[in-house]
Image (spheres, helix red, strand yellow):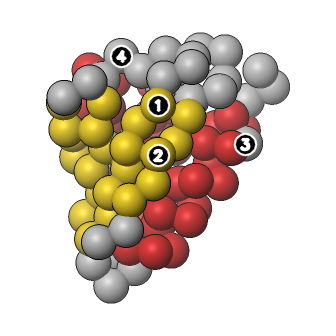
Amino acid sequence: MPTQQLSIINKLGLHARAAAKVVAVASRHDAAIRLRMDGREVDGRNIMALLMLAAGKGSTVEVEAEGPEAALALSELEALFARRFDEDE
């Protein structure tokens, strides 16, 4: 199953709006998405769990995808993180 280390580069980190975008991507694909940080692992379709990671700017999360659309989902998440969740900073 593909995994990717993704850095959070936007100013506010993985806050509610950014987490909602992660959930949207994860929910769009036939793949189970898991994010890991500091020994915690959460479901990429669960916004509250994502917020509990408290992933701030400069954090790195490991994203794992499993399923028929795993590679596509991971690619879209990588692009979303690289675009700073479509935020200015």
The residue at 19%/38% (across/down) is: 41
Q: Position of residue 65 (x, y in %)?
A: 33, 64
The residue at 64%/38% (across/down) is: 85
Q: Secondary structure at mark 1?
A: strand
Nearer to the camera, 2 or 84: 2
Which residue is denoted by mark 3 in the rendering?
A: 83
State how far apart marks 2 and 4 are (Cα).
Answer: 17 Å
Which residue is denoted by mark 4 in the rendering?
A: 54
Give yes or no for contact between labels 2 and 1 (Cβ–Cβ under 8 Å).
yes
Nearer to the camera, 71 or 16: 71
State how far apart marks 2 and 1 are (Cα).
Answer: 6 Å
Asked if residue 83 lies left or right of residue 12, the reply is right
State how far apart marks 3 and 1 are (Cα).
Answer: 15 Å
26 over 9 or under it: above or below: below
Give yes or no for contact between labels 3 and 4 (Cβ–Cβ under 8 Å).
no
For mark 2, does the 10 Å Cα neighbourhood hold few (<14), some (14 to 19), or many (20 or more) residues?
A: few
State how far apart marks 2 and 3 are (Cα).
Answer: 15 Å
Asked if residue 5 lies left or right of residue 83, the reply is left
The residue at 21%/39% (across/down) is: 42
Q: Amino acid at mark 2?
A: Gln
For mark 3, does the 10 Å Cα neighbourhood hold few (<14), some (14 to 19), or many (20 or more) residues?
A: some
Q: Position of residue 29 (x, y in %)?
A: 40, 71
Q: Earlier in the sequence, mark 2 or mark 3?
A: 2
